[in-house]
Image (cartoon, grey):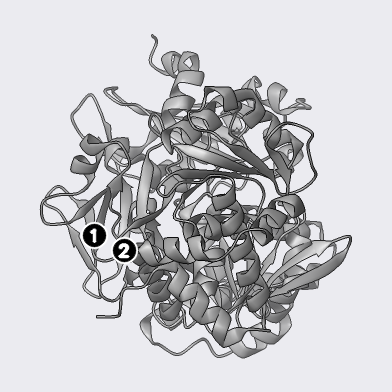
Amino acid sequence: MTEKLTVMQVFEKTADKFGDKTALRVKRGGTWKETSWSGYRDEVRLAAKAFIKLGLEPGRGVSIVGANCPQWHIADLAAIYAGGRPAGVYTTNSAEQCKYVASHSETEIAVVENEVQLAKFLEIRDELANFKAIVLMYGDSSEDNAYAWPEFLKLGEEADNAELDKRIEAQDPDDVCTYIYTSGTTGEPKAVMISHDNITWTARAALESLGAVDDDHMLSYLPLSHIAEQIVSLHGPMVAGATVSFAESMEKLGDNLREIRPTIFLGVPRVWEKIQAKIQAAAAANPSGLQKKIGAWARKVGLKGGYADQTGEARPLFYGLAEKLVYTKVRERLGLDRCRVAVTSAAPISQDTLEFFLSLGVPLMEVYGMSECAGPTTTSLPTAYKTTFVGRKLDGTGLKIADDGEICMRGRHVFKGYFKNEAATTEALDDEGWLHSGDIGEIDSRGFLKITDRKKDLIITAGGENVAPQLIEGKLKSIPWVSQAVVVGDRQKHLSALLTLDETKLDDAIAQAGSNAKTMEEAADDKKVAAWLLKEVNKINADLARVQTIKKIKVLPVDLSIDGGELTPTMKVRRKVVNKKYQSFIDGFYGA
């Protein structure tokens, strides 16, 4: 068994070992600015002392809200050093949602990105018990107890090390060190209590399984309030001594990918789907018939080669030629030419998208886990993966399928419980230490796990048959013009689906349908679009069991979104929100 370590022990060891090597990179004024491991540590210790100076008590919360940047990392680690408990807040949260997290976590200090996020905390701070200060990552404020970042660090320079060292020494690897707030697909978010050992052991196990080394380079762009991004770009690089570059924005992700050329890259399914759509659109717009034929041939060869790799068989004869003519160029254009491991996680991904990238020599490694197990519980590796399966369990952990099909896990990665929610903790953790995931799955003879659905999402038809909607939704999303699909039909005689059109393919969809519509809203109300799309759905129905087939559809006037409340920040569908928002359409399916 590997030694239990605190976050501070891991960070200090890495800073000592890699000193002048680059830890963090961020673009400022068009130029990439670098911070070494020793400089990173110095700033974390300064910030920790500043937190103490501002009155942060051990065990109290530090709310952090902002886009990914060095200050986010530093604030998070500094809070832990000072004995506090960082709680990431999604940038899309309203002031009321910020208040919930800040109040629940007993936040005493908030670290905010800019004036937009500052305004939320200024609105709620008088309602928070023991709230002491706000720190801005960028800009400054004349408000009382609000500090610009340089001003904040200066407070740390004025404090001595004795109290900080005392707080570091007081912490044990089994102590809670951070809160991860669930994205709240059902009800209010719960605070997942993660210990030092949870996060340091899991980061090491995950990164070692991927063969991560200090020469690796990660790109940070997914919300740091999510456990997946913390493993990939905060705690993981700390274990390996790797370098992290921060993307400028989601809009510039493609440009940053080509600039940074990461060696390990995590994309949520929606990111991979958008990349897929852009590649397909570019291919369709290419006037060269010869290039289209070469591309189609290469994809056919690539798909066969990808599946051959999974079973240990020889690749097709001309795979090397296809690699030279197509796959290498695709990877270069995407910025994935150095990428050893391309990961997809955080939400279900369709077989269509998995096979699309497999056919281009970019196999996506599915990783499965949850906040409650500090991120990953299974990993897929370039040397051991299986398309549509989410990999094998991490070494040193337990994984089983319960009698009712639920996936359960046990090990040092499993959380300490939910803060202030004993009932939910008891429901999630049984007496033998097994974490009940709420997901339904199966394990094959080689140890690969397949997720079939969410336990609570299962639809029970009027005939009493259990139907897994995610499987059907994945197939519906393989229709080229469909962006999102939500299957409904609980306690009904048949299934129906709410569908949204891909905005980037709207013109083509309208043309295919022979419609005169000009906008998403017009297309949603057009009978020609609905009739055409139902024909596409019926092609999917042909490969489904009778009970799984979709009898009716409704095209929604807008895509599902985070801002609209239908998607979580990691692009998971909030079914309750969708069902409530479009209840009239659902009622229409069943004559209510």
Give the SS element for disc 2.
Answer: loop
In the image, is 497 to the left or to the right of 463?
A: right
- Residue 108 visible, this angle: yes
The percent position of residue 185, horizontal first and vertical second, equals 42, 35
Q: Which mark is residue 409?
A: 1
Residue 354: % across, % down = 51, 63
| Residue at x 41% of width, y 79% of height | 209
> Dot 2, crowdedness within 10 Å: few (<14), some or many (≥20)?
many
> Circle 2 is placed at which residue position?
413
Q: Is residue 137 left or right of residue 311?
A: right
In the picture, the quarter occupied by the C terminus is top left
Q: Position of residue 378 (x, y in %)?
A: 35, 66
Please give the name of the residue rendered at 55% of the width and 87% of the height, measured from the top-left corner: 17
Q: CA distance from mark 1 to mark 2?
A: 9 Å
74 or 242, which lies in front?
Answer: 74
Nearer to the camera, 565 or 472? 565
In the image, is residue 49 above or below residue 265? above
Q: Which amino acid, by three-letter code, is at mark 1?
A: Met
Examine the rendering and report whether any part of residue 389 can be seen. no
* Depth order, front residue of 246/328: 246
The relative height of residue 585 versus residue 208 in the rendered view (above or below) is above
